[in-house]
């Protein structure tokens, strides 16, 4: 039976889940304190770039299953299942900022007019769901609700596909009634035999952090092997391919690059170290991953300096600002760290990204020249550095770039280009691990 769902927090995760759950036949109201966002959504404008989302969005709005509101209290009152999908940023020296989750928890307590299932989608440290349950009980003086930890595993840029084809759904809860309601809203996935993992709060919370930290570790491992390849003359692509053929290792997340970024791996690895500190359990492996990843970004600038010499006054064309392809998200993007380092070393930067220019302008303003055309960015550049693996950078017109550029070095931090072709076009090719 279709359910009435409130999605509190309509960012990347809230919007994709809201749209997806509506497509499963549920009635979903997405609510947010950001009234601009809600105004846009009411006008059928999607505030983020996420491939494939528009079609599902329009269909469900048209069918009357998806609506938007900036009235959080009313949205809570009118729905039985309340998802919390607000941001949980990591603040240096302070830890995970749970103030947004807490604020929603207090709003729920104030509006607990009948039985509700409160589902935490946001990534939250171990202990948060238990704490949330206590907070709502204390604030409302009512226990007519259940809490469920239902962590999210979608990837930006592939979020729609991931919503409809998850590798697993994790449901951490202590109530059979709530478990049945969750099974009901995800019935479409249950029927196609998506694996469901039912567990307690703490286990669900740890599954999320362990998953992200493991993937971050895998990337960091291959980045270090890539660096070793450069010194010993190995080819990282063959190393990745061959080790990935071992099913115990698996071929995914073995692409070397400028270090991982994004709104989650950096924050969730830091949070896991913090959780370890809180419980006095060593998490030094993840701590090292964080340190090595920071080095990897700066290493890209060092490679540039090794090839080009002192960067003072040199013009560097940066292609790609998003933390990965198919998104406009620049949170913790390696490109941001690389540009900051280039500016520190007194280089001049011209940049292009097919989706993320506007977000990057908010950080760099006039310090970087932003170009709508990638060929405009390379004009008179001493070096070209590719930082995001956008498909359009795989088929660059190298002849045209050679005529436009002043210098002859291409640093390909994602190994998108064929070194032989780049060299044939008259450039010096620098990749990662090959
Ligand atoms: P986001 O910043 O894109 O969206 C969060 C939204 O919550 C914003 O629109 C904000 O205005 C809103 N919000 C904040 N406080 C609110 C309140 N009190 N009431 C109503 N709305 C409020 O964040 P996101 O990327 O969607 O991430 C949300 C959570 O999901 C985080 O915990 C994140 O770690 C986790 N997560 C994110 C991804 C991802 O790919 N982005 C994947 C898995 C898990
Ligand atoms: C990641 C996880 O993949 C999701 O399962 C999870 O839900 C999400 O974090 C989250 O918790 O927010 P996302 O950050 O969107 O998703 O993107 P990924 O595709 O995982 O890439 C993360 C970073 O690692 C990017 O900077 C990417 O370029 C880099 N990466 C990825 C590599 O350098 N090499 C690889 O082989 C894979």
Image (spheres, rainbow, N blue to C red):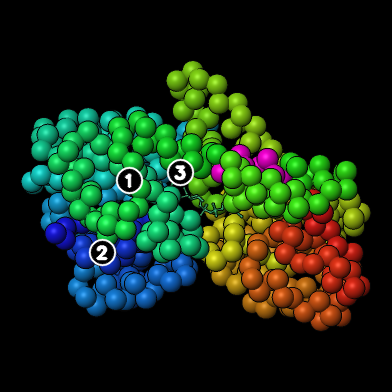
Q: CA distance from mark 3 to mark 1?
A: 27 Å
Q: Name which of mark 2 and mark 1 comes first in the sequence.
A: 2
- Name the image quarter holding residue 185: bottom left
Against 118, residue 358 (above or below) is below
- Near mark 2 (Cα within 10 A), the count class, few <14, some 14-19 or many ≥20, is some
Mark 1: which secondary structure? strand
| Residue on which the image places disc 1 | 196
Left or right of 231? Residue 285 is left
Mark 2: which secondary structure? loop
Q: Name which of mark 3 and mark 2 comes first in the sequence.
A: 2
Q: Is mark 1 within 8 Å of ligand 2?
A: no
Q: Position of residue 261 (x, y in %)?
A: 59, 50
Q: Residue furthest top?
A: 280
Q: Which residue is depicted at the point 14% across and 41% down?
A: 177
Q: CA distance from mark 2 to mark 1?
A: 17 Å
Q: Residue furthest front?
A: 246
Q: Position of residue 22 (x, y in %)?
A: 25, 65
Tell me the quadrant of the picture where the N terminus can be found. bottom left
Against 173, residue 254 (above or below) is below
| Residue on which the image places disc 3 | 89
Tell me the quadrant of the picture where the C terminus can be found. bottom right
Q: CA distance from mark 3 to mark 2?
A: 30 Å
Query: Which mark is nearer the camera, 3 or 1?
Result: 1
| Residue on which the image places disc 2 | 24
Looking at this view, is 59 or 280 the one in front? 59
Q: Position of residue 259 (x, y in %)?
A: 67, 48
Against 69, residue 344 (above or below) is above
């Amino acid at each position: 039976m279709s359910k009435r769902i409130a999605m509190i927090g309509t960012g990347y995760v809230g919007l994709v889940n809201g749209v997806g759950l509506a497509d499963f036949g549920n009635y979903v109201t997405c609510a947010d304190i950001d009234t601009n966002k809600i105004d846009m959504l009411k006008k059928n404008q999607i505030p983020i770039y996420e491939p494939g989302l528009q079609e599902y969005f329009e269909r469900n709005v048209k069918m009357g299953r998806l609506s938007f509101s900036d009235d959080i209290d009313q949205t809570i009152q009118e729905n039985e299942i309340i998802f919390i999908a607000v941001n949980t940023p990591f603040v240096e020296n302070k830890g995970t900022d749970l103030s947004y989750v807490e604020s929603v928890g207090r709003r729920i307590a104030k509006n607990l007019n009948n039985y509700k299932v409160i589902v935490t989608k946001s990534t939250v440290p171990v202990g948060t769901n238990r704490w949330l349950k206590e907070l709502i009980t204390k604030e409302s003086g009512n226990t007519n609700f259940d809490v469920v930890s239902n962590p999210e595993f979608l990837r930006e840029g592939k979020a729609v596909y991931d919503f409809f084809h998850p590798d697993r759904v994790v449901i951490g809860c202590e109530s059979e009634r709530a478990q049945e309601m969750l099974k009901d809203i995800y019935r479409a996935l249950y029927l196609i035999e998506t694996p469901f993992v039912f567990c307690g709060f703490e286990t669900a919370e740890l599954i999320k952090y362990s998953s992200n930290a493991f993937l971050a570790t895998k990337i960091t491992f291959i980045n270090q092997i890539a660096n070793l390849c450069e010194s010993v003359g190995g080819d990282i692509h063959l190393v990745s391919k061959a080790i990935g053929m071992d099913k115990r290792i698996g071929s995914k997340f073995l692409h070397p690059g400028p270090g991982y970024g994004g709104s989650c791996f950096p924050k969730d690895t830091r949070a896991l170290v913090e959780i370890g500190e809180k419980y006095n359990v060593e998490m030094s492996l993840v701590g090292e991953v964080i340190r090595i990843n920071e080095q990897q970004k700066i290493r890209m600038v060092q490679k540039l300096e090794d090839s080009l010499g002192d960067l003072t006054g040199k013009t560097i064309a940066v292609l790609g600002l998003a933390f990965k392809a198919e998104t406009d998200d620049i949170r913790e993007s390696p490109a941001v760290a690389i540009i900051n380092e280039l500016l520190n070393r007194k280089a001049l930067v011209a940049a292009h990204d097919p989706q993320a220019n506007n977000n990057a302008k908010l950080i760099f303003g006039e310090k970087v020249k932003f170009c709508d055309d990638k060929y405009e960015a390379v004009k008179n550049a001493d070096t070209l550095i590719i930082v995001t693996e956008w498909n359009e950078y795989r088929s660059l017109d190298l002849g045209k770039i050679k005529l436009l550029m002043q210098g002859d070095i291409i640093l390909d931090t994602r190994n998108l280009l064929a070194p032989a072709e780049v060299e044939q076009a008259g450039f010096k090719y620098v990749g990662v691990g090959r």
